Structure formats: structure tokens, C-alpha cells
Image (spheres, rainbow, N blue to C red):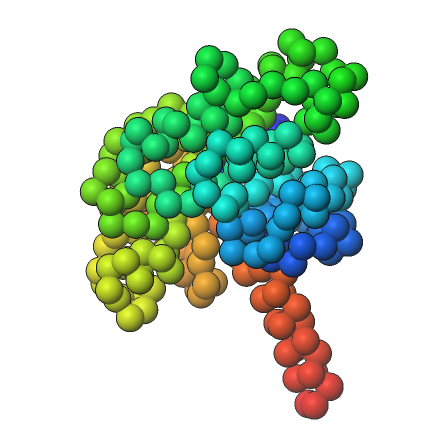
Amino acid sequence: MNLKTRLAAREQLVGTFIKTPSPMLCEVIGSTALDLVCLDAEHSPFDRLVQDQCIHALRSAGMPSLVRVPSAAPEHILNALDCGATGVVIPHVTSGEMAAAVVNSAHFGAGGRGYAGSTRAAGYTAKPMGNHLRDSAEETVVLAQIEDLPALEHIDEIAAVDGIDCLFIGRIDLTVALGARSPKDDVVLSAVERICRSGADAGRTIGMFVGDLDELAYWKQRGASLFLLSSDHGLLLQGAAQLVDRFRT
């Protein structure tokens, strides 16, 4: 099954963020048993060329790749998908209208994603147009990141938009937006639970980043099935700390 099908089936999936613009690092991560990888082009310096190289490395390794794009601008979505990304994570989705617009930008059709047969996604002209249109419709995934107060106000209409494959909860930004001091504050937990309920009611997959892995069971019970955990930076720091601790003891 492809990633889109696995998301829709609510399989328990785990991935990580890549914040270092490095094709070699992506090649290494691509060889692991993770279900997917997300390139963080929103918060890290991924220009189009290195993004292209990283996606190429992940595709070569058979690893599904998402790109958290810098914004919902159609050109950012187009760039990631033309390079061959499996899908996109759209930050700061705040309304049903915006959710519908990003779905349109990610798919071919009237007013949607512009077509070019010369891209990696299209096989550099080797793939017939009909096949590329079919495969894109069947495989491209769109994740709407929910992280703002207006998104909470419009969460039911966002969740109702066809073509949103997953509501991805940006809990840290929600913490800031709600004026809380910790992502474990009650007001934040209540907001996250509200998103989970709305997603469940609309039949949408729920994804999230969890900093404390002891929380995984709690959120799985509330319907979350996609977890992007840690990052290449976090894994490096954790590995170095474990190495030093093992050496010292």
C-alpha cells in the first residue's frame, strides 16, 4: 500500500523531521525502518536545489517523503511535488476555504497544480500524461497543520474538506497561540483533544509531533495514528548523549 492508503487506513505510522539540508543524511535516514520522513522547509534552509536532491535520495531509498513547505503558496506546493515528494504538510491552515485551496494546488485539474512532463515526478517525459495524472491523484497526500486560534474556531469546516488526508497538530504553536507556558497545560490538551474529536467525526486521519514519548498511548487512544517524532538534530543529540553516558559509566 502507498502512504495515502496507509494514512486512510489509520495505520500506526512513525516518521521524523529532517532539518539538515543534506542528501547524504536523507540517504542514511532512508535506509531505516521509519515509515516516512518530513523535510522541514518551513523552519530550515532548504532551497529548491537541495530539496530536490534530498527528495531524490529518499525516493532512491524507497522512503516516502513529505515536505513541510514554507507557506501555502501554490509555488511551494508545486515545487515539492514536481521534485517527487509524496506529499506536503501545509503550515498555518486556518479555514475550510484555505484547506480547499491547498488541496486544489496539490492536484491537477481546473485552477490547480500546473502540469509539466519534464519533472522527476513525471519521469522526465518518459511517463505518459494519463499515467502521471492517475498516479498523482492516487498517491499525493496533503496534510493540514492545525496550530492557530482561527484554526480551532474553524476546525470542523477544515476537517470536512475532501482531499485533506490528515490533520497534523502543531502543538507547540498552539501552546504559544493559547498563551500557555507548556504543551502539557490543560488548555493545550483540551485544544488537541478537540482537534482529534473533529477529525474523528469527519473521518480524517490525525497526526502530531509528540515530545514526550510516554504520551503516545494517550494520543493513540484518542485517534492519532501518524506520529512525526524527533528530528535528525534530536537523533544526533540523543545518540551522542547515549554514547558519552555509556563511555563514562
Whether residue 84 is situated above or below residue 148 in the rendered picture: above
- Residue at 77% across / 54% down in the picture? 24
Farthest bottom residue? 248
Q: Is residue 100 above or below residue 40?
A: above
Q: Quarter of the image for the N terminus: give it.
A: top right
Front-most of 96 and 220? 96
Please report the residue visible at 26 percent of the width from the left and 66 percent of the height from the top: 180
Residue 4 in sight here: no
Total numbered labels placed on residues in the image: 0
Q: Is residue 168 left or right of residue 46?
A: left
Report which quarter residue 124 is drawn in. top right
Q: Left or right of 50: which side holds 126?
A: right
Which x, y percent locates residue 15?
A: 58, 49
Residue 151 or 69: which is nearer the viewer? 69
Q: Is residue 13 left or right of residue 175?
A: right
Q: Residue at x 56, y 31 (%)?
A: 78
Nearest the eye: 191 or 77: 77
In the rendering, at what x and y percent does residue 231 appear?
Answer: 58, 59
Does residue 156 show up?
yes
Question: Which quarter of the rendered picture does the C terminus lie within?
Answer: bottom right
| In-image side of 151 versus 108 (left or right) | left
Up/down of 100 relative to 24, above or below:
above
Residue 163 lies in quadrant? top left
Vertical position of residue 204 compared to residue 129: above or below: below
Residue at 26% of width from left, 31% of height from top? Answer: 157
Expressed as whole percent of the image width and height from the top left, the position of residue 109 reads 50, 14
